[in-house]
Structures are given as C-alpha cells and as structure tokens.
Image (tube, grey):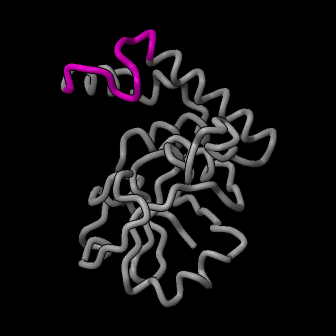
Amino acid sequence: MQVNQYSFAWKQKDSGRVIGGDWDQLENLTAIDSRFKYNACIERWKLNKTWEETGIYDFMLECIQQRNGPVDKCSSLDDILARYERLDNLFENVKLTGRLKTQRELNPRCYNEEGGIFIHIGRQNQVIFGGGGIHRLAIAKVLQLNSIPGQLGVIHPEALPTWKMFKQMPAIPLTLNR
C-alpha cells in the first residue's frame, strides 16, 4: 500500500470520526511530494543535501513571519537549526534501529499515538496522510520501513465493512515516488 496523498480536510481533533463525503477522492487530495517540508526531508536524507541547500530554513522563517508567531515550536533561526538537528538525530536513530518509536514510547502519557503520523482511511481502505508527522513519514519512506506507528484520523464509512480485516494487516509498506 502506498501513502502518497495528503488531505487537508480533517484535523487531529477529528481522530477516529467516521465521515462520509468525497474528501477521499483523488480530486480532493494533494500529492505528498508537493509539500515543501516533505521534499526538503527527501532532499536531505535521500539526496544528501544540507538543510540549507533544501531551503527549509528560509521556508520556516517565512512561515514564522507570515504567521507572526511560532511554527513547529520555532520562533527564530536558532530554534529552526536546533529542530532540524534533532530531526537528523531522529533519522540516524531510526536508521540504526530500523523503526520509529511510538508516541507512547516517547511519552508514557501519550494516548492513541497523538502527535504521531496522522493517517486517514479512505473508502477503499487507502491510507491518506493527514498532515501531522510529515518529517517522520519522510523518514519512514526514505528508510523504507515495513511499518509505522500512526494516529488514526478520519475513516470513510464505506471502509468500515473491511476495516477490521485491514487493521489486522501486519504492516503498511511505504513506497517513495522518487
């Protein structure tokens, strides 16, 4: 199964909701590889560019300026540099261990993978990225992990009859479109 589409339709507060409509149709989705942060991660970890060469520092500074406030808990260039150094460390750790830790492993108070990779399930049981955890998703794709921990987003009602079978699958293989 591939995770190549992104939906802006739902937020993490909608986690676990069953919602109909056409939100899962291709014309209402965006390709993940059209997202700047995702591409910066791929360029960094697959193509060995520096973060500066990817343009992520300027992108983040512009986002902070446009929002007139923090983005990804970053308010300054120093915050951005520290964040992307932590992401490099995470990448190296996942490369070494072969897995992403669950949110509960990172914080025992975490519930239902909140703050992890946010995944919706479309009517044909297609996995649709929901926005949260884009750096972790990029790590999983670059390292071709066999499975990832994820926070359940919205489920389309047409997926429910097969959802039980689907959720018992051993892994969701990720493929990279590059």
Residue furthest right as drawn: 97
Q: 78 or 144, which lies in front?
A: 78
Q: 103 or 65, which lies in front?
A: 103
Vertical placement of 20 versus 73: above or below? below
The magenta segment is: 67-79
Q: 104 or 28, which lies in front?
A: 104
Relative to 122, 87 lies left or right: right
Vertical placement of 132 versus 4: above or below? above
Spot occupied by residue 51 in the image (x, y as percentages of width and height)? 50, 25
Q: Residue at x 55, y 53 (%)?
A: 112
Vertical placement of 20 versus 120: above or below? below
Vertical placement of 41 versus 128: above or below? above
Relative to 144, 19 lies left or right: left
Q: Main secondary structure of the magenta part?
A: loop
Relative to 144, 26 lies left or right: left
Residue furthest bottom as drawn: 161
Residue 75 is one of the magenta-drawn residues: yes
Quadrant in the picture for the N terminus: bottom right
Q: Residue at x 44, y 43 (%)?
A: 39
